[in-house]
Image (cartoon, grey):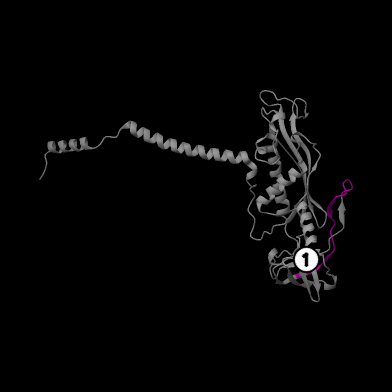
Amino acid sequence: MKMSSQENNKLHHKEHKEMPMKNPLGVLCGLCGKFNRNLRMLCICVMAMASLLACGCDGPVFLPPTGPDYVRPTIAVMKFENRAGGGVGGWNLGDGFRDVLVDRLMATERFQVIERPEIDEVMKEQKFQQSGATRRQNRVQSGRIKNVEYLIKGTITDFGHVSSKSGSFSWTDRLDIFGRSNKAVVSMILYIVDVESGEIVSSQNITESVSAGDTDVMLAYRNVSFGGKVFYKTPLGKVTEKVIDKAVRRIASEVAARPWQPMIAQVNEGSVILNGGQNRKVKVGAEYEVFELGTPITDPATGDVIGHSTGKTIGRIRVLDVQPQFSVASVASGKIADVNVGQRCKPVETP
């Protein structure tokens, strides 16, 4: 049945009246509620980030990813030499810097870290077990401690607050109202030593500073433990963290990035043994050039070994068999009589 235009208008008007009207105030409140929830989530995220930054030392230093053939080098961190004096807090800076650096290096999972004090304790325990005073069951074998490849040493040269008014370090100067005349400064010299050759493969002077704001130097470090959570909220704690982070990155770039160099471990009749196998990603068919290490080059001022002269090339070897921790190779060129234990090898570049 066809409806007239007048009846049709009445029907549309009735439907329009029956549709519920949304309260504009309610719509606005709903939008505000969603905005507030999003704002609260944003605030939570910002506070979480601020908390992470404030605690700083709890998180590892982020380094570029390693390749599939990466092998963790073994390093030992020595007690730092402190030339900066005692300073505030009565801290043992030499032990403190070493402990913090070890913690940060371990957190990267790039290194096998050994501390010298721990080695001494292990040696005492091994000696005690070998004395016959303990049972034979589960007795450890001597000579099984891993050889350290690199020693990490450091010298602390500056550690304190420096005033722009006097241009020198001070623990007692009072700060001006804006805190612009005082900074916390930490400096250290980092040394990386190749244990086998005694060569210093890297040295770097690392210096960082942060504004001390309106900190009262005499009160800020009272009852504060070096390396604790409270310490890293202080100006000296913040700048120490920056210096240690730079040291970790330097060690990673110099040590972790250094390619492994195989050595001759044994010479048999017709074959030679390399000191690396599957653990060093050695492949069957790989060729190495065998050479003798040249004479050490010594810095006359410090007595440190800073390099080696070019050594004699012995010949080439080709890998025949790869075992978990060693490889068997044959002499591809040269005389096997000239190959000796301890000689070094470098991979031959294939065209």
Residue 296's place in the image compared with 171, above or below, is: below
Picture residue at 15% right of the left edge, 36% below the top: 10
- Residue 122: give x, y in percent of width and height: 76, 57
The stretch in magenta equals 299-317
Q: Where 258 sits versus 176, above or below?
A: below
Of residues 239 and 14, the one nearer the viewer is 239
Magenta stretch holds residue 307: yes
Looking at the figure, which quarter contains the C terminus? bottom right
State which quadrant residue 37 falls in: top left
Badge 1: residue crowd in 10 Å (few <14, some 14–19, many ≥20): some
53 in magenta: no
- Furthest toward the left, the residue is 1
Q: Which residue is mark 1?
A: 289
Give left or right: position of 298 versus 156.
Answer: right
Q: Position of residue 280 (x, y in %)?
A: 70, 63
Quarter holding residue 288: bottom right
Q: Position of residue 172 (x, y in %)?
A: 75, 27
User: Residue visible at 51% across and 39% down?
Assistant: 44
User: Judging from the image, what secondary structure is the residue with disc 1 in?
Assistant: strand
The image quarter in which residue 289 lies: bottom right
Query: Where does the image place residue 75, in percent across and percent down from the top left?
Result: 74, 54
Q: Residue furthest right?
A: 300
Q: Is residue 187 above or below residue 328?
A: above
Amino acid type, mark 1: Glu
